Image (cartoon, rainbow, N blue to C red):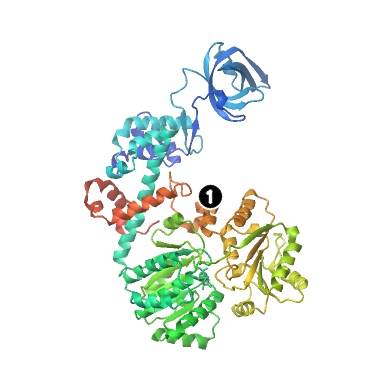
Amino acid sequence: MNEELNIPTTTVNGIGKQKAESLKELGIETVYDLLMYVPFRYEDFSVRPLETVRHDEKATVQGKIYGEPVVRYFGKKKSRLSVRLLVGPLMVTVVAFNQAYLRDRLTPGQDVVVTGKWDQHRMTITAQYIKSDREVSDQSYLPVYPLKGNWKQQTLRRYIRLAYEQFSHLLDDTLPNQLREAYRLMSLSESLRALHFPEGEADLKQARRRMVYDELLRFQLKVQAYRKQKREEEEGKVSAGPREEMDRFISSLPFTLTNAQNRVLDEVYTDMKSPYRMNRLLQGDVGSGKTIIAAAALYATVMKGYQGALMVPTEILAEQHTTSLTELFEPLGIRVGHLSGSQTKKQKREQLERVASGEINVVVGTHALIQEGVHFHNLGLVITDEQHRFGVEQRRILREKGETPDVLFMTATPIPRTLAISAFGDMDVSVIDELPPGRKPIDTRWAKPNMLDDVLRFIRREVQKGRQAYVICPLIEESDKLDVQNAIDVHAQLQLAFQDTNVGLMHGRLGAEEKDAVMGEFVDQKVQILVSTTVVEVGVNVPNATVMVIYDAERFGLAQLHQLRGRVGRGAEQSYCVLLADPKSDVGKERMQIMTETNDGFELSERDLELRGPGDLLGKKQSGLPEFSVADLTRDQRTLEVARQDAIKLIASEAFWSREEYVPLREWLEAEGVLEQKALD
Ligand code: ADP
Ligand code: MG
């Protein structure tokens, strides 16, 4: 598309060899690049009545020179020019630094336009520009481009104007008319005109709207085309038994599913029933009840005669899931196995044999599950819980073992939906956006470290009521560099403070068995207070724990704080979360504030997104987020959703692949390599 414009910038009349070279510094090689080089902001030079300008605000006003300019010099190079100016009914002083040459150009009675900062108390404008009426261009919004080196805005503006005048008639619009009309979008050449030479704010807004939609639509077309291809190429299987059997299992549970759980289970079941390979992400806030969805899906796959696997990030979690699935499944004659790094060789061998023979129907474990030496009899479904990293690599390992199971990823790390769509572009996304009934919101308080005594008193009160508490510290041992509480010290302190109570200690340096032992004591209520690093962060379920105290809470991100808080509030009792923090930064304070204001993981992550920006939320490197030139994922979420729906429809439609008007988009997809099944970047 737009091949005709893939010509060197020297073809623009007025751009020579040398200038073309320096354009390359900005990444501009062709005329097309030049036209598509978009400003990142604008300067507003539209003339305003002075009455509408606030104190200290920068604005442009028009007035009449009143009296002679006066220049004073400081040293050799510095000067200060001042002149009186009549703006409407107001007499003000205009001051300009180091622009002494203006003295001879400004004459009493002359009409001028002044841009500068307004000081309402002194009735003074500190001028950036003073221009005679005649000099003022009719463009009141001027683009500001990202520049490097010696580049000046003026120069680039001129080149872009030259290029636009000479070549804009050759611009091909990739957006088909039908879509442009449906959304009343400007043409490509019209929107570039508006971006480079805007007539005003409204003009600019329309241009931006078109460019954002265009960019996001193409991004989503790429994602959807890639998915379509993968679907056709990847082997899948029908991995679920009859619906009635799964429903019967569900109705045997002691509770009924929430609407959200039902909807999500439908989506999962439909995928499993289809001959395509399921690749679905299930998001649900902590405590929203993901485990039972996993159980139902595993049940369905066993009913089809397949094995199911549940993979989790920690041994503690593996133990817990094994226990709860055993309780659910054993009475129904489904055998649950367990694979872990801490098993003895003999135990492991025995489990491996039973998995290979198909005697075990459902196996739970850490990533040991997909390692060498593990052979399944017939694997139909793999579910990963809280395992955000499980992805391409693990799927490859499974494929190489000859396994093409359906895959379901479950996560409580709340990722705003739009971000999930883009970061996990080749996955389907299901969301549980509802908690089981009767949950009491966790009462979250932000306490300064000097209130520690009150906090300890509070823990004592809850412990006396028979409840349990978590106390989280950022580090294991004391560190000279970081003035943070460490688990070992805090454990010692609390042992002193709570002499009649058992205080446990848990951290990442303990061996797997030690960890299990400590956790086991907490689960069995032999330990009332558990001091821990963040190893308890994910998944563990101790409904009797009602207090979560987090030391140095400002050191944690919002997602992690929320995850930690999710360890309490899992039973019927009112639960509490205390954030001990004295953040120095505004962002830190804001985070504490947000935690006390909402219990909703999705709202929290939206606000986190605003606070940090999208790349940061997932960690720039591994986020896999595409770079957009106009679109902004924090601002353009709605457009992304619309573009996604449109892309899904287009890719699935006959018209897209055959009709003339889609040729430019198809050519673009081809040029991007998507149709040759290259991976998404
Ligand atoms: P998470 O999504 O954090 O993994 P769990 O699956 O551990 O949440 O569920 C938390 C608790 O809620 C469990 O004790 C579970 O039995 C219970 N639960 C799940 N679904 C429901 C429901 N529909 N009604 C009542 N309780 C439920
Ligand atoms: Mg869970």
Viewer-proximal residue among 299 and 227: 299
Q: Is residue 97 visible?
A: no
Quarter of the image where one finds residue 439: bottom right
Q: Is residue 465 above or below residue 678?
A: below
Q: Residue at x 59, y 65 (%)?
A: 564
Q: Quadrant of the C terminus?
A: bottom left
Where disc 1 sits, the SS reads helix
Q: Position of residue 189 (x, y in %)?
A: 33, 36
Q: Residues within 10 Å of mark 1 (few under 14, many from 20)?
A: some
Quarter of the image where one finds residue 67: top right
Viewer-proximal residue among 416 and 331: 331
Quarter of the image where one finds residue 249: bottom left
Q: Residue at x 57, y 24 (%)?
A: 51
The amino acid on which the numbered mark 1 sits, given as a three-letter code, is: Glu
Q: Is residue 151 above or below residue 240?
A: above
Q: Is residue 567 visible?
A: yes
Left or right, 5 with reference to 25: left
Q: Position of residue 561 (x, y in %)?
A: 60, 61
Left or right, 494 with reference to 59: right
Q: Residue at x 35, y 71 (%)?
A: 272
Circle count: 1
Q: Mark 1 highlights which residue?
A: 610
